[in-house]
Amino acid sequence: MLASISASIYVKATKKSVFLLDRCLAFSQIKQIQSHLTVSGTLKDPYAAAKIISFCAVSRAGNLSHAYQLFLRLQFRSTFIWNTMIRAFAEATEPSRAIALYKHMLRSNFLPNNYTFSFLFKACTDLNDFFLALACHGQAIKLGWESYDFVQNGLIHLFATFGFMDHARQLFDVSSNRDVITWTALINGFLKSGQVTVARGLFDKMPEKNSVSWSAMITGYVRVGLFKEALALFNAMQISGFRPNHAGIVGAITACAFLGDLYEGRWIHAYITKNRIELDRILGSALIDMYAKSGRIDLAFCIFDQLPKRDVYVYTCLISGLANHGESAAAIELFERMQNEGVVPNDVTFVSVLNACSRMGLMDEGLRIFENMSKIYGIEPQVQHYGCLVDILGKAGKLEEAKKVVREMPMEPDSYVLGALLNACRVHGDVELGKETVDNLVRLNLDHGGVHVLLSNMYASANKWGDVARVRKGMEDKKVRKVPGCSLIEADGG
């Protein structure tokens, strides 16, 4: 009699504690419940232990480290508990620990199920380890889990991520239960492999769409430069009654930036404000870039000042915008402020600030910043940085120094580097160095009509008319034509 009463009290205590877990809003509350379960001995119950580990591992109020320590102390573990921890590490962008835990699971004589493999495939994708993924796939086949929905969805996503679209499509075609996640994974794969038409065909055939699938298609268009199509789809999405998610909004703002569509960009900004969408660094950077490219550097500054946290990407966006709008002094000042606030610049930041130095003719400042890249920040200059340096030296009339940089740089110069040197030759009338630079461009197949016309004009300025005629004839023989210039402006918001 007493034993049955004790068992009843034990079950009620367990159920009550587990029920309270679902209502926890803070980690401190979870610890209180855990203490109660430990004192009462209820934590030894596999069901109660699984619930508290699951809540600690995957809920917002939880703590993954605490969940793992609790997991290690458990005397009895179930496949559900193993899966919970593997999933938690996979979703917490700790894929190596997820794989290590899976190996521990096998050594402990626990067999995985279909849910296990869906988490493993995500971990393999995050690790960018296709051979490990194939090994996991082989185990799924061996244990008979390959045909299950979770496993097939994971495999489709896996093959699509690694660009094996034929395999992904074959799995998709034989899948009996294709949900919106499966469709979106396949569409994403085709978009990343550049097969936009195929992706759009699948998108139009989707029996059910959600905000994620719409946003995937929008960002896919942006990735390949189809900005008008991206905006048209963004508008169609809202007409269809779907609210754009974070990725879709960023994609649409990026499209506005490249199109110079300030009207649409401001409408999206108003939408963000109206719906109280958090202005994080990704969204903030996109808005700063859009306003800067649309000529509203004042509004770009407003967004910058509103952001609660400003990282290297936010700073770099505004520095680049200022440099491109001729406000080089402000760009360099912002670069100094960035360093004073402890934000470490990256390689793109240095391209932007060196560009600002070039535009202002600040040779000494530019040389100092270029030197500090590797000396202070350990960033080895790339071809873009050398291009900026050549431009800085060339505009200062230091042609020999610029020529030396081109000859001694550790990689092959590109069209930007040689173009900067050629432009300096034009400005300072160094015809011989200009001819040598054009020869290098021809050797690298980087010459075009504008290069030959520039050389011809340099010869004309030096009254070398025979050389002018030779260059013009060479253009005719090679059928080289100067590409006409064009420009685009937004009129009345259209």
Image (cartoon, rainbow, N blue to C red):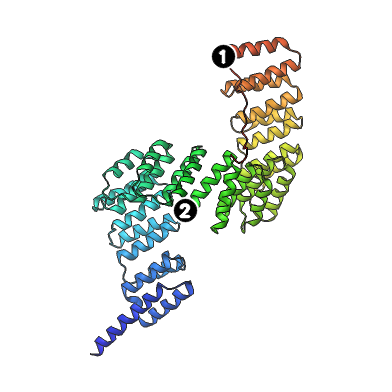
Up-down: is 399 above or below 474?
below
- Specify few, some or many for label 2: CA neighbours under 10 Å numbering under 14, 14-19, or 20 or more: some
- If you read the primary sequence from the N terminus, does the residue marked by circle 2 or circle 1 appear first? 2
The label on residue 213 is: none
Question: Left or right: 161 with respect to 12?
Answer: right
Residue at disc 2, secondary structure = loop
The picture places residue 117, in percent across and down from the top left corner, at: 32, 54
Q: Residue at x 50, y 52 (%)?
A: 246
Report the quarter where the C terminus lies.
top right
* Residue that carries the numbered disc 2 in the rendered image: 243
* Gap in angstroms between the C-alphas marked 2 and 1: 54 Å
Task: Please identify the quarter of the rendering in which residue 372 is found.
Answer: top right
Let me know if residue 13 appears in the view: yes
- Is residue 91 positioned above or below 266 on the image? below
Q: How many marks?
A: 2
The amino acid at mark 2 is Arg
Mark 1 residue element? loop
Quarter where residue 111 is shown: bottom left
- Of marks 2 and 1, the one in the foreground: 2
Q: Is residue 162 visible?
A: no
Q: Return the residue at label 1.
A: 478
The amino acid on which the numbered mark 1 sits, given as a three-letter code, is Lys
* Image point (73%, 28%), residue name: 399
Q: Quadrant of residue 264?
A: top right
Position in image of residue 125 (x %, y %): 40, 49
Q: Looking at the rendering, in which quadrant would you find the N terminus? A: bottom left
The answer to the question of whether label 2 and label 1 lie on touching residues, with beta carbons closer than 8 A, is no
20 to 399, vertically: above or below? below
Residue 483 as seen in the image, left or right of residue 68 = right
Residue 95, x across and y down, in percent? 42, 55
Instruction: Name the one closer to the observer, 299 or 67.
Output: 299
Q: Nearer the viewer, residue 95 or 317?
A: 317
